[in-house]
Amino acid sequence: MIRLRSLFAAVMLFGIYSLLSAAIFTSLDAVDVAFTEASVGAGISTVLMLGTLSLTQRTEKVPESTIRHWIALGVVLLTGAVLVYASLDMPHFGDPMAPIHQHPVAHEYLVESQDKFHIPNVVTSVLAGYRGYDTFGETTVIFTAGIAVLMLLSHKPGTRPEDVR
Amino acid sequence: MRVHGVQRVGAKILIPYILLFALYVQFHGDFGPGGGFQAGVIFAAGIILHSLIFGLRETKRVFPPALIRVLISLGVLLYGGVGVLCMVKGGRFLDYGVLAHDPVHGQHLGILFIELGVGITVSAVMISLFYSFAGRKVP
Amino acid sequence: MTTILGLYNYWIVIGLMMAGLYVVISRGNLIKKVIGLNVFQTSVILFYVSMGKVKGGTAPILSDEFQVYSNPLPHVLMLTAIVVGVATTAVALALVVRIKEAYDSIEEDEILEQDPTS
């Protein structure tokens, strides 16, 4: 996907990548996240990218100089090495004694929420009950994105930019 | 896009089930994976399938863009409205316990309405995104 | 050996993150850059979700048959993150369409040639 010239193939591979990551999320017990990633990543993102491809071009231009690739590769390898060194301090995968599980919030969400909410799906009760204000902000973000795209794309093609400047 | 009979018949059978599944995911978010966001996206996917098979003009006839624009704002208004209603009834903003006679039922009612608001906004935004991208003339 | 067995999920995430970063830095095509950003975002979500997993646990939907559950807090935060990410991608793609109409190209160097002040 990184080195493909055909953008159409890159977008298709991106859709497959989204679906595979949704399968990985399911195996990591994150069913709500997997549901959202599958529907949003493999659905809406791919459809919008295909729409953009139809309105612009299908293939990528071959670059003249390759110096940029080597610089990018160097930066990426350096950053990756630093991050791997930093990850040696992290708790092991799946460890029940990790600090994230010791915080009292986890116990509150999993056990105490039953007295307050009687809702089996803990993710929904946290999202809508304990952290409802954050979900309000998220809905406003979606609203703003919709308004922004409506404003950007309501301009009819054919008007020359000289008229706007 | 030339549409064959198989695609048309298949879509006619599938689209009601997709929309029904979206409603199921919306209202069963309490008992299984799901909730407002997933339901909104699945509903929009059903509408996009309709427009792919039957043409954008047909879909715009059934779901006019003006209605979709109103729905975008309606979802956010519903969410904020529930919060303000909680304040009017004596609690804090988005404190659903005061909505009904019993705190647990109040929480259920509050969560139901805000998930509905989220689902309406998300589906309307996704449909209007598709209308903007697909309805544009290719330069 | 136990270090590798315990930490391999972080290294997979770092690999994906660096792949996305490489695409954003090295490619000049705007749509490729947007794809690279999405790859980066998916890797960050994978990072948080893998931190929340408990060995032997199950999905955080309470029922009488299971006792050990995975931590629901990262799932909630990542749900918001995915939705905000798709909103950002939609606005970015709308901007790409407008750039194409204004400059007639979506390659970064051609756009910079036409408009050196930006």
Image (cartoon, rainbow, N blue to C red):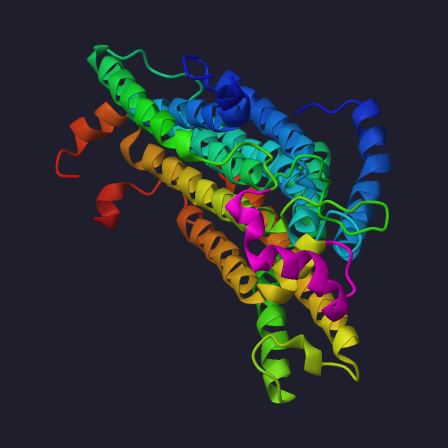
Nearest the camera: B26 or B45? Answer: B26
Q: Is residue B13 magenta?
A: no
The answer to whether residue B63 is above or below residue B15 is below
Left or right: where A25 falls relative to A73: right
Residue B67 visible (yes or no): no
Left or right: where B10 falls relative to C54: right
Magenta segment main secondary structure: helix
Image quarter of residue A21:
top right
Q: Residue furthest left?
A: C117
Q: Residue C116, how many percent across, how many down?
A: 13, 33
The answer to whether residue C75 is above or below residue A87 is below
Q: Residue A64, how many percent across, how many down?
A: 22, 10
Q: Residue C47, how many percent across, how many down?
A: 50, 35
Give the residue displayed 45% in from the left and 35% down from the top: A90
Left or right: where A16 falls relative to A88: right
Magenta segment range? A97-121
Nearest the camera: B109 or A4? Answer: B109
Q: Is residue A104 magenta?
A: yes
Residue A90 visible (yes or no): yes
Nearest the camera: C56 or C41? Answer: C56
Nearest the camera: A141 or C76? Answer: C76
Left or right: where A17 falls relative to B25: left
Q: Residue A76, how many percent across, how many down?
A: 31, 22
The answer to whether residue B27 is above or below residue C9 is below
